[in-house]
Image: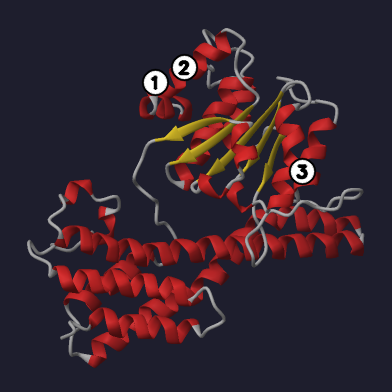
Amino acid sequence: MSLYEECRARYPELLARLEHARKNGRLTHAFLIQGGSDREREEFTVALSQLAACPASKNGRPCSVCRVCRELEDGSYPELYTLTPVGKMYQIQVGDRVNPEPNTLRHFENCFFLTSIADAHRKIGVIRDADRMNDEAQNALLKTLEEPPPETLILLTTGNPASLLPTTRSRCQTLTLPNNHCALEFAGARELFDALWKLFFESEGDLARVEEGAGVLIRTAGSLSADAAGKIERDWESRMASAARAGDPALVKRLEKQRQNMADGAYMKERSRFLAAIHAFCAQLFLLSQHADFADLPNPECFDGHEVPKEISPERAARALHEAEELLFTLRFNVSEELALRTFAVNLASKGR
């Protein structure tokens, strides 16, 4: 089954309406895709791009096998432009007005005014985690959202639409992917969930077990930066090699800075998933303590490999959720991450009085 068919099986009514709009030439040029997980939003942007650009479309539905559809699915479509948050602040900056830096809003916009070279003559721009645009970047984008160049499709994706300016949201057609599941995928996720389980259910009064669990949390957090940097380095390997062969030191230096910004942004994304996983584990303990149905949990994979007790102390589960929220709040400031995680582990293991 093609990616498009998988998405259509997941969102049949939504894509049927979009196919009808494409068939009748009424497909808009700017969409805000919200909800779902990172992966679901990413897959839906590919499906919507195929729907809009496929030259062999029948009744509004893309063929999924032509060159355009295949290039969009594997990310090699020559006029697919993406913009993602970067840096330690994990933000999308507006960029210099005259000579905008790569991976800034103005550099992204300039791509749409180049002569088209693609088979479908359709330019597609995707802004991932669009809520990370600062106000200046969002305001600079408004004119392009209102009056884009011909044959341009702009897709904004976000899991936090409330952080976008009303003026940005109003210029896009909103598509909501209904799903209460937040994907918690990062290096060491399984080990983290096992450690949280042992801390809450098995470690009370056992300092050695508490220290072991705290160690897992600290090591997992510490590995996120190297893991993110490794992924970015692999993605940029051929680009950096080409720059080195060109013999242009200035180009190499500029690309190295861009790669580091991308690595910093990727780390912040991984770190947010790590912290979200801790909060999700504790939040679901609280839901279960209130006799929520296990099948209705947004992230039941947190408890894979363990048999959840029929009764969980509501007071202790509420305290665990409070500790998770305190951890997230504390780590917003310049504090020792290791100390904060160790304190959280101790408090999670304690049954209190």
Q: Is residue 259 visible?
A: yes
Mark 2 residue element: helix
Secondary element at tag 1: helix
Quarter that holds the C terminus: bottom left
Residue 77 image point, x, y percent: 68, 32
Q: Which mark is residue 17?
A: 2
Q: Is residue 63 above or below residue 212?
A: above
Comparing labels 3 and 1, the label whose residue is closer to the camera? 3
Q: Which mark is residue 13?
A: 1
Report the amino acid beneath label 3. Answer: Ala
In 3D space, how far apart are the residues under numbered discs 2 and 3 (Cα atoms)? 30 Å
Dividing the picture into quadrants, the one containing residue 154 is top right
Neighbor class of circle 2 (other Cα within 10 Å; few <14, some 14-19, many 20+) is few
Q: Residue at x 40, y 67 (%)?
A: 188
Which is nearer the eye, 26 or 115? Answer: 26
175 to 306, vertically: above or below: above
Direction bottom: furthest residue: 207
Left or right relative to 245: residue 66: left
Under mark 2, the amino acid is Arg
Give me the C-alpha separation between circle 3 and circle 1: 33 Å
Q: Which residue is mark 3?
A: 140
For the residues marked 1 and 2, what is the alpha-carbon distance in whole angstroms?
6 Å
Are discs 2 and 3 less than 8 Å apart at CB? no
Circles 1, 2 touching at the beta carbon (< 8 Å): yes
Residue 319: horizontal and vertical position, in percent?
Answer: 25, 74
Q: Quadrant of the N terminus?
A: top left
Q: Nearer the viewer, residue 254 or 52?
A: 52
